[in-house]
Image: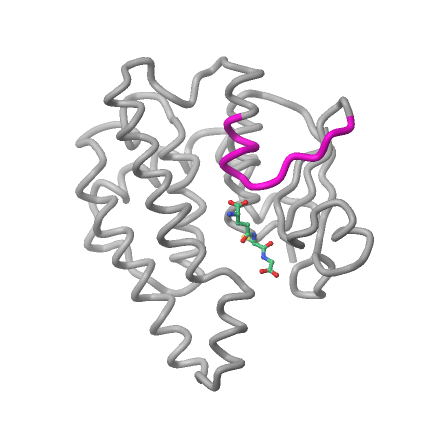
Amino acid sequence: MDLFNYFRSTSSYRVRIALALKQLEYQYVPINLLKGEQREEHFVALNPQGRVPALKIDTGELLVQSPAIIEYLEEVYPQPALLPEEPVLRAQVRGVAALIGCDVHPLHNVSVLNQLRGLGHDEEQVNAWIAHWISQGLAAVEQLIGDCGYCFGEEPGLADVYLIPQLYAAERFNISLGDYPRISRVKALAEAHSAFVQAHPAKQPDAS
Ligand SMILES: N[C@@H](CCC(=O)N[C@@H](CS)C(=O)NCC(=O)O)C(=O)O
């Protein structure tokens, strides 16, 4: 498999964690978002949306969008499972993943921030925008996850796959996690887990 991604991209980071948890090997294909490589002809020919991640599977098909890629991995490589068996718990895990993936991350994506800048907002306003959406999302996640272990139990799962990259983004934008003891507990566990360590942006070949 070839993973088109960028070390700092949070949605790429999700897929890297899922691949590492399932101990799947892949080729790392860097797409430099700061240099605009996602808009270059060769990449747009693969992914017309011009975004990472994209996963080329061994049969040659290209999968786009981290939720679809992670679901594919879960279906084809079911162990270790990222989703619990029980339907209510599955929905709760998916709820936290969707909160981050649909309601937080898209609001601080590179192209959204550039659009704000293009409309005349200065860096202070852009940073306030980012902090608002990330803090609001994390405050809700703090209420939704459990009191011990990872987000939902003793083993990492889909909610953790989404939360840990979001915390990396929070740190980059200087957002304190001081008000979120449950989230801080999950972060400490992930920092000691080899799959999360392996998937961390700083460990990637294009890290700068
Ligand atoms: N919903 C998509 C989001 C993908 C996305 O926004 N990727 C960002 C990096 S985290 C990107 O490629 N941005 C490039 C751009 O906006 O030009 C997913 O989960 O895969």
Can you say whether 108 is above or below 105 in the image?
below
Which residue: 47% across, 15% down? 80
Between residue 10 and residue 192, name the one nearer to us.
Answer: 10
- Relative to 86, does residue 203 appear above or below in the rendering? below
Q: Quadrant of residue 107?
A: bottom left
Tell me the quadrant of the picture where the N terminus can be found: top right
Q: Position of residue 145 (x, y in %)?
A: 23, 35
**Horizontal side of residue 208 vs 78, given as left or right:** right
Q: Is residue 144 left or right of residue 162?
A: left
Locate residue 153 relative to residue 207 in the image: left or right: left
Q: Residue at x 74, y 53 (%)?
A: 44
* Relative depth, front residue between 82 and 62: 62
User: Farthest residue toward the right?
Assistant: 42
User: Which is more toward the observer, 162 or 206?
Assistant: 162
**Number of marks:** 0
Determine which quarter of the picture holds residue 143. top left
Q: In the rendered image, which quarter contains the C terminus?
A: bottom right
66 within the magenta span:
yes
Q: Which residues are magenta?
A: 60-71
Residue 26 drawn at (x, y percent)? 70, 29
Q: Position of residue 41 (x, y in %)?
A: 81, 57
Quarter of the image holding residue 73?
top right
- Outermost front residue: 48
